[in-house]
Image: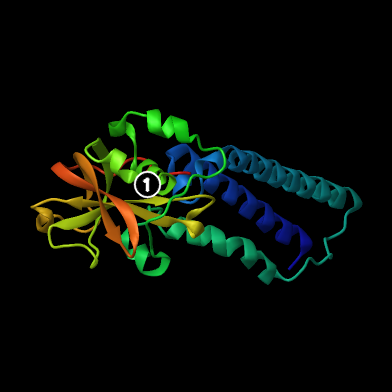
Amino acid sequence: MPKRLYRSFQALLLLGMSIFLGSKAASGQLTFYINQRFVPLTIFGVVFLALLAQTIFTEIKRARQRDDEHDHDDHDHAPVASNLWFMLVPLLIGVLIPARPLDSSALSTKGFNTSAPLVSGDSSAQLFETDSEERNILDWLKLFNYDRDVSKFYGQKASVIGFVYFDEALGEKQFLVSRFVISCCSADAYALGMAVNWDEAAALEQDSWVLVKGTVNSVTLDGVVVPLIEAESVQAVPAPEQPYLFP
């Protein structure tokens, strides 16, 4: 393949990747792939890719002008065209496969986690002081892992949103209200959940999003004490714009 044609395709692929990532950032779907704290860095990458594509287009234009002035054809050859596939394949995958958050089908490969210890930067005091109904699933599990005496949380009001997941370890009238947590990107995502005790649990559909309100108790799963909500109400809700939680 002539060098000029190769460079043209290269620039188009860089521009395409820039547009693709930029559109995902604008639509908010970028966080389906990565932790939200990396969004600014990705936007910087979008700008860099666009500038790099523009630089290549400018280089091609100047080369054409030089060729016209010296009246000779471009006989230089670039690396084989198959090298372009390394850029084209990930772009095609991103365009052709719709962006959607992980659901219970991912649990078969990623598994389920009942542990969420405090990590660097967490403030245990802040979690304790936060109104109980403002805590999300990750907050509750952090508290249960942080404090050995979980009985102090019994009777506190909880109000959490998550998707329904039925686990064989639970009873007939129980389910897990779950969320995926992303530390870096969707490749390292793992599911967390709070057990829910509700008489009408059997009427719920797997993966449906619900708002669960009730009082906190506990249950032991696989030898680990995890929070359980004695549900007073379970209300169907739309999937949140940001379905993931970030530690």
Relative side of 139 to 36, left or right = left
Relative side of 33 to 6, left or right = left
How many other residues sit within 10 Å of disc 1, few (<14), some (14-19) or many (≥20)? many
Q: Residue at point 80% right, 50% down? A: 64
The residue nearer to you, when weighing 72 against 13, is 13
Q: How many marks?
A: 1
Q: Residue furthest right?
A: 70
Residue 163: x %, y % from top left:
27, 51
Q: Quadrant of residue 111?
A: bottom left
Q: Residue at point 46% right, 44% down? A: 246
Residue 95: x %, y % from top left:
47, 56
Q: Quadrant of residue 238?
A: top left
Residue 17: x %, y % from top left:
58, 51
- Residue annotated with mark 1: 144
Visible residue check, residue 197: yes
Relative side of 99 to 104, left or right = right
The residue nearer to you, when weighing 52 against 114, is 114
Residue 247: x %, y % from top left:
48, 44
Q: Is residue 40 above or below residue 85?
A: above
Kind of residue indicated by mark 1: Phe
Element at badge 1?
helix
- Quadrant where the N terminus lies? bottom right
Q: Residue at point 33% right, 45% down? A: 150
Please say which color scheme the image uses.
Answer: rainbow
The residue nearer to you, when weighing 209 against 86, is 209
Q: Residue at point 57% right, 42% down? A: 120
Relative side of 155 to 245, left or right = left
Visible residue check, residue 237: no
